[in-house]
């Protein structure tokens, strides 16, 4: 079994990347919160085709969880994650401590606007501020040439692209297609929490999303139909079932050239999200 180099300090990670870059190597970053699944592995495989060295960061970021959310129970399984990385082109894992990332006296917050408005923010107002701060830190700490994010968190991808552009962070952001289970359920670390009955209901999400994306009905009618279908399938709450402008996630208007269908719905305490081109 190959021993993957696990780096825990920002200084060591910077040093490693600087050495690679000094040798003319192109370096890529795959930011994760661990609990790695095939979706993460596909991000690694995709980025490794375009760079010479790959870093996977594993950090459960407290600032993107609200007090009532699952920070304490979010799966932390570093040994299993390192096993999962065997056979994939990973040169280093960056797994810092919370104290490294948020030292005493940490006082910076980010207030994200533009594509951060609505959808996830209506339900998780703290979320994109927390994501933006940790992704900005990881990008500035590592100074990799490229970083990759899954389209499953489509709004997150747009927020990160906007943040990188606005702050002139010199990195290329790649968006990667969603990886799905055989019944269409988008892969997510939170799927592991689903019991058998919930897993069966969750499998209907993608079909409902596809009907929302393709129904051809007026927007409000298509959204209402998707919401009803989710509740009829057994979802307890629908946070949103929406058709939006794919460029900025604002309401569809005369200027819209491409659309995105997005859903967030809950089964008990488990929140599932999915999206597709519409
Ligand atoms: O998508 C995720 O897993 C997280 O939001 C990210 C981008 C790793 C930041 O913590």
Image (cartoon, grey):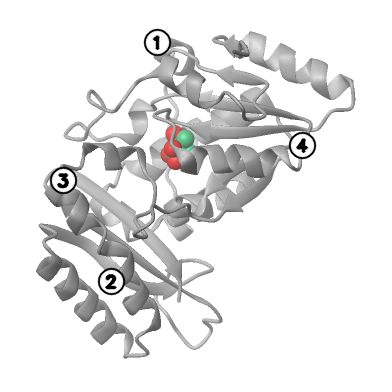
Give the image quarter of residue 203: bottom left
Which residue shows up at 70% across the image and 37% down it?
A: 48
What separation in Å lies between label 4 and label 2 (alpha carbons)?
A: 37 Å
Q: Secondary structure at mark 2?
A: helix
According to the picture, the residue beneath numbered tag 1 turns out to be 104
Left or right of residue 166, residue 158 in this image:
left
Q: Nearer the viewer, mark 2 or mark 3?
A: 3
What separation in Å lies between label 2 and label 3 (alpha carbons)?
A: 20 Å
Residue in front for this viewpoint, 204 or 116: 204
Q: Nearer the viewer, mark 2 or mark 1?
A: 2
What separation in Å lies between label 4 and label 1 (alpha carbons)?
A: 35 Å
According to the picture, the residue beneath numbered tag 2 turns out to be 208
Q: Are marks 4 and 2 in contact (CB under 8 Å)?
A: no
From the top left corner, tell me how far across and down residue 120 is, in percent: 32, 54
Q: Disc 4 beta carbon < 8 A from ligand 1? A: no
Q: Are marks 2 and 3 in contact (CB under 8 Å)?
A: no
What separation in Å lies between label 1 and label 3 (alpha carbons)?
A: 43 Å
Closer to the chain start, of discs 4 and 2, is: 4
Closer to the chain start, of discs 1 and 3, is: 1
Q: Are marks 4 and 1 in contact (CB under 8 Å)?
A: no
Closer to the chain start, of discs 4 and 1, is: 4
From the top left corner, tell me how far across and down residue 166 is, in percent: 62, 49
Crowding at dot 4, Cα within 10 Å, few <14 / some 14-19 / many 20+, comes out as some
Quadrant assignment for the C terminus: bottom left
What separation in Å lies between label 3 and label 4 (alpha carbons)?
A: 40 Å
Which residue shows up at 15% across the image and 42% down it?
A: 195
From the top left corner, tell me how far across and down residue 92 is, in percent: 64, 19
Q: Quadrant of ligand 1?
A: top left
Residue 196: numbered disc: 3
Q: Are marks 1 and 3 in contact (CB under 8 Å)?
A: no
């Amino acid at each position: 079994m190959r021993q993957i180099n696990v780096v825990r300090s920002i200084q060591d990670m910077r040093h490693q990347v600087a050495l690679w870059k000094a040798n003319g190597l192109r370096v890529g970053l795959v930011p994760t919160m661990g609990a790695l699944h095939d979706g993460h592995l596909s991000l690694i495989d995709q980025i490794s085709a375009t760079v010479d060295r790959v870093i996977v960061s594993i950090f459960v970021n407290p600032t993107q969880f609200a007090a009532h959310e699952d920070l304490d129970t979010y799966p932390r399984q570093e040994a299993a994650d390192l096993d999962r990385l065997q056979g994939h082109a990973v040169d280093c894992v960056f797994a810092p401590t919370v104290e490294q990332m948020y030292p005493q006296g940490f006082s910076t917050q980010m207030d994200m606007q533009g594509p951060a408005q609505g959808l996830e923010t209506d339900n998780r107002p703290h979320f994109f501020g927390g994501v933006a701060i940790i992704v900005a830190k990881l990008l500035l700490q590592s100074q990799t040439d490229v970083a990759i994010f899954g389209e499953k968190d489509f709004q997150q991808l747009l927020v990160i692209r906007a943040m990188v552009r606005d702050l002139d962070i010199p990195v290329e952001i790649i968006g990667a297609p969603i990886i799905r289970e055989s019944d269409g359920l988008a892969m997510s670390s939170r799927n592991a929490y689903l019991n058998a009955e919930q897993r069966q209901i969750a499998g209907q999400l993608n079909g409902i999303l596809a009907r929302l994306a393709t129904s051809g009905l007026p927007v409000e009618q298509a959204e209402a139909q998707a919401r009803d279908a989710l509740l009829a399938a057994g979802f307890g709450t629908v946070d949103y079932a929406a058709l939006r402008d794919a460029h900025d996630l604002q309401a569809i208007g005369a200027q819209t050239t491409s659309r995105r269908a997005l859903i967030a719905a809950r089964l008990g305490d488990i929140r599932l999200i999915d999206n597709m081109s519409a």
